[in-house]
Image (tube, rainbow, N blue to C red):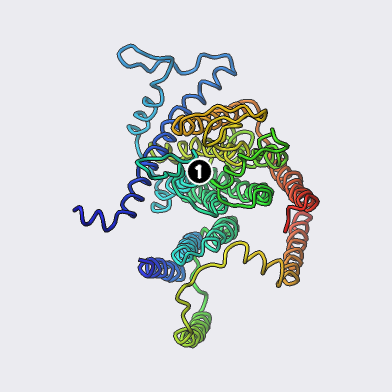
């Protein structure tokens, strides 16, 4: 039962991701990415990682993807289809894809031999909170600094455009 | 047959009970939604000194407009189903589902009563008993954005796109506040499950004040209500729709596709009302009513049958839901629409700092009371 759900959602995520890569229309590609993110959330649910599934939907599907989509829509490029300009760009793209694929295959070879934890289940909200605000409190706070920097950068960029 | 039943007794009973709960609860919600569309028109008529809809009749029996929801539904079904020539067909079709499905799914987490004993089984009056329900409420309400956005984008109409962009910006902003207002509740009651939350609200403060969310988190309640109305996209936050300026993201929709968008708005009203009741007004709790009956603070007790207690609790939840639905209707017909900069200013400069401050104060008080381990 669980294995079936895992394979179903995993296959769905892989399919949506593949379709996304071959989709030319940016907004449709974003919708396929949303489908991939939601299937990943389903995968977490199938593995009874309930908090992770909820956070995946809240953060990725609810917040980040929405911002992506808005950014895509206000860009005029989103309304037109762009063909790659010359042969050189295509070859470069194919080369980059080949490098990525070989790396992925290498990584998956390690995964195959990894020890499988049979009774996989989430440590729970309390355990996660203890780790986040206990052992990794410093790193967690550092992360907020990174976000603060990006907010300042975004405000500066927006303010500059208004003057022009 | 009997062997199959004996072998799978647990799962069969579980799915049977779940199916009955879904049918009863969602059936009730749907009927209430239909009545709410009538109530909206009647309340607006009352507030503007008009009569309101009262003509639809069956065999000359009008019942002051009670048949209007049915007449509306028939009208919607018979309208032409129009798809603009340049629209993205698939996404245009999917958008109404994206608007309606997440909202309907959310009702699974709402406890509409404590429990009833049926043939010796204890039946929880909640469709899905999820321990992290609050997170799921936030997750699914976040998905409702896609209905608005896809509807506007796939129509390939600039007015609809404007509505969709406004909607995405507004809903993302107010969802942050919505999520932060719930943090205080989770801190105080120490749970993210809605049924546990309601049960925790049955306790008494100082021996006589019910420990409802609104008593311990009054600021959070007001912020939650404002953010929830904004998420619901109704006046004063209806810039997404803005009938007098941009018509809205569903501009190109007609017939039942449009009805799905409109219906989802009314279902959301009920959802907001139910969430407000569940989170801040004790859900199905009746003050001083316990499993065995009423026990007043003075020590007087009135023993009641289990089924009467359960009925009182479900009734209490229904009354609270109806009250908040009415309140949301009145708010809509009272306040004028915000300007867009006011809308964003209110969210990021007023509500968000207040919500963060509320969390800080809640934490400080909990620390002072020694409630944090």
Side of A83 relative to A142 (left or right): left
Q: Position of residue B206 (x, y in %)?
A: 73, 37
In the image, B349: left or right of A37?
Answer: right
Query: How packed is label 1: few (under 14 Cα within 10 Å), some, or many (20 or more)?
Result: many
Work out whether residue A42 or residue A121 is closer to the camera in this orientation and state it. A121
Identify whether B362 is placed above or below A57: above
Q: Residue at (52%, 26%) from the top-left corner? A: B40
Of residues B150 and B2, the one nearer the viewer is: B2
Is any part of residue B100 visible from this angle? no
For numbered disc 1, what is the local secondary structure?
A: loop
Please, is residue A127 above or below residue B349 in the view?
below
Residue B178 seen by the camera: yes
Q: Is residue A141 left or right of residue B55?
A: right
The percent coordinates of residue A35 (x first, y second) are 46, 61
Which chain hosts label 1? Answer: B
Residue B95 place in picture, x, y as percent = 45, 48
Locate the N terminus of chain A by quadrant. bottom left
Q: Identify the residue at image location x=71%, y=72%.
A: A135
Q: Is residue A164 above or below residue B75?
A: below
The C terminus of chain A sits in image quarter: bottom right
Relative to A54, is B128 above or below? above
Near-viewer residue (A85 or A137): A137
Residue that carries the numbered disc 1 in the rendered image? B110
């Amino acid at each position: 039962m669980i294995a079936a759900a895992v394979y179903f959602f995993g296959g769905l995520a892989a399919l949506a991701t593949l379709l996304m890569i071959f989709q030319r229309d940016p907004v449709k590609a974003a919708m396929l990415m949303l489908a991939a993110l939601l299937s990943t959330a389903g995968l977490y649910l199938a593995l009874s990682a309930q908090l992770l599934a909820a956070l995946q939907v809240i953060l990725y599907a609810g917040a980040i993807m929405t911002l992506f989509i808005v950014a895509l829509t206000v860009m005029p490029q989103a309304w037109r289809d762009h063909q790659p300009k010359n042969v050189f760009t295509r070859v470069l793209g194919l080369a980059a894809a080949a490098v990525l694929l070989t790396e992925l295959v290498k990584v998956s070879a390690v995964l195959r031999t990894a020890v499988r934890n049979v009774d996989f289940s989430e440590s729970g909200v309390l355990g996660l909170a203890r780790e986040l605000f206990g052992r990794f409190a410093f790193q967690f706070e550092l992360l907020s600094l990174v976000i603060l920097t990006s907010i300042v950068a975004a405000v500066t960029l927006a303010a500059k455009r208004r003057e022009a | 047959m009997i062997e199959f039943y004996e072998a799978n007794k647990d799962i069969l009973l579980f799915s049977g009970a779940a199916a009955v709960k879904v049918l009863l609860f969602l059936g009730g919600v749907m009927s209430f939604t239909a009545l709410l569309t009538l109530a909206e028109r009647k309340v607006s008529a009352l507030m503007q000194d008009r009569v309101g809809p009262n003509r639809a009749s069956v065999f000359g029996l009008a019942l002051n407009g009670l048949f209007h929801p049915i007449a509306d539904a028939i009208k919607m079904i018979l309208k032409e189903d129009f798809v603009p020539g340049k629209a993205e067909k698939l996404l245009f079709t999917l958008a109404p589902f994206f608007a309606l499905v997440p909202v309907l799914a959310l009702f699974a987490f709402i406890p509409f009563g404590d429990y009833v004993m049926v043939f010796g089984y204890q039946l929880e009056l909640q469709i899905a008993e999820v321990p992290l329900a609050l997170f799921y409420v936030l997750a699914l309400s976040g998905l409702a954005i896609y209905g608005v956005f896809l509807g506007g984008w796939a129509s390939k109409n600039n007015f609809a796109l404007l509505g969709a962009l406004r909607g995405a910006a507004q809903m993302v902003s107010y969802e942050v506040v919505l999520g932060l207002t719930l943090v205080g509740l989770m801190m105080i009651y120490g749970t993210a499950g809605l049924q546990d939350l309601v049960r925790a609200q049955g306790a008494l403060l100082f021996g006589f004040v019910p420990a409802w969310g609104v008593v311990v988190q009054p600021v959070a309640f007001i912020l939650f209500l404002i953010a929830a109305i904004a998420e619901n996209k109704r006046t004063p936050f209806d810039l997404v729709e803005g009938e007098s300026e941009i018509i809205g993201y569903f501009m190109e929709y007609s017939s039942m596709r449009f009805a799905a968008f409109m219906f989802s708005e009314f279902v959301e009203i009920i959802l907001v009302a139910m969430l407000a009741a569940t989170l801040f007004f004790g859900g199905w709790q009746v003050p001083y009513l316990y499993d065995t009956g009423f026990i007043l603070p003075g020590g007087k007790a009135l023993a009641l049958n289990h089924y009467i207690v359960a009925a009182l609790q479900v009734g209490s939840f229904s009354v609270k839901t109806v009250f908040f639905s009415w309140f949301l209707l009145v708010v809509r017909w009272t306040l004028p629409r915000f300007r867009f900069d006011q809308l964003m200013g209110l969210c990021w400069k007023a509500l968000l700092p207040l919500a963060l401050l509320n969390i800080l104060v809640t934490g400080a008080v909990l620390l002072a009371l020694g409630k944090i381990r």
